[in-house]
Image (cartoon, helix red, strand yellow):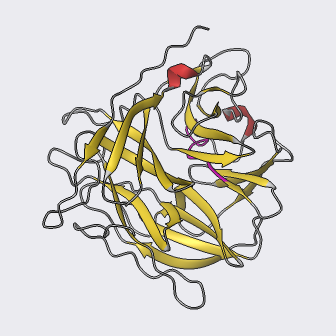
Amino acid sequence: MKKTWLIAPLTLVAYLPSQAQNPIIKDVFTADPAPLVYRDTLFLYAGHDTASVQETNYKMPDWRIYSTTDMVHWKDYGMRLSPRTFAWATGDAYAAQCIYHNGKFYWFVSTFHKKDDNSQGGAAIGVAVSDRPTGPFKDAIGKALIVNEMTKDKPHAWDDIDPTVFVDDDKQVYMYWGNLSCRWVKLKDNMTELAGPINVITPKNYIEGPWVYKRKKLYYLVYASAGTKPEMIEYCTATSATGPWTYRGIIQENVPNSFTTHPGITDYKDKSYFFYHNGALPTGGSYRRSICVDYLRYNPDGTIQPIVQTLTGVAPAK
């Protein structure tokens, strides 16, 4: 399959201290933020909402990349990946995460599968790979990593979405994903094969959008939840990447003008940051969302303090 790559010119989102920084991307609608720190740069991988004001479902044609070195000025690399990259895929560009491992960048994405010999359709997870954080990316396997037929605990066809991938201190790779149930599996070091069975866990109030990371001796499983409707963000902790997970509570209340939200967490230049999306831009909404960032703070015991959603966002990182 011949692939073409769209290289967009870089643009800069300006920061004026007297103005609201959030949402941080204002020229297009973005969702499902996934930060990655590589060397001295924070890269932000994002979904792209293009539904009209009148539409009542998602229209997400591609994934985009942004970067910053100070948390207030953002380079825009444009569209860098789409479901068209995957010959087996059809449908929308749902939540995704890119991680760096063994000298390469692996972008784990959720989209939908064509009806063929490998799957009868439904949500699926694929992997794209690149030598650079901004691509170009290509399908790393030539087929989906996860298809709907591999997960039977839920009957709906859109349950295999929202992958998050975590590399533990011993270099074991884990992937977590799922809608209405949270699945996890070990991956082989090549990032493109399963290294064990798929496991199912049921964190309290879990809906979708997991994000897993480790800080000091604690593992964190943060997710979009049904604590109330619309979604909030809740979390669990564990002393192992495989659990058991202890529920810790709500850390982010409902966001403005969107019934979904989605966590993305990272440390950068001695600060902890919490990325999420809302519907706060003019003409925005649940299908026209926008990425924001605020500070993430911890208590001495490692629990997370409630996220304070702000219009001003974060200060320039030194």
Kindly indicate the quadrant of the structure image that contains residue 22: bottom left
Q: Residue at x 48, y 38 (%)?
A: 94
Q: Is residue 111 left or right of residue 177?
A: left
Picture layout, residue 5 above or below residue 250: above
Picture layout, residue 297 above or below residue 158: below
Residue 163 magenta-drawn?
yes
Q: Residue at x 86, y 45 (%)?
A: 195
Picture layout, residue 177 above or below residue 246: above
178 or 180: nearer the eye?
Answer: 178
Kindly indicate the quadrant of the structure image that contains residue 8: top left
Magenta: main secondary structure: loop
Q: Is residue 240 left or right of residue 51?
A: right
Quadrant where the C terminus sits is bottom left
The residue lying furthest to the bottom in this view is 300
Picture layout, residue 308 above or below residue 158: below
Q: Is residue 92 visible?
A: no
Percent x, y of residue 154:
64, 46
Residue 265 magenta-drawn?
no
How many numbered discs sit on the rendered protein?
0
Magenta span: 157-165
Q: Is residue 104 left or right of residue 306?
A: right
316 or 106: nearer the eye?
Answer: 316
Q: Is residue 59 visible?
A: yes
Q: Residue at x 55, y 21 (%)?
A: 85
Percent x, y of residue 250:
46, 75
Percent x, y of residue 251:
45, 75
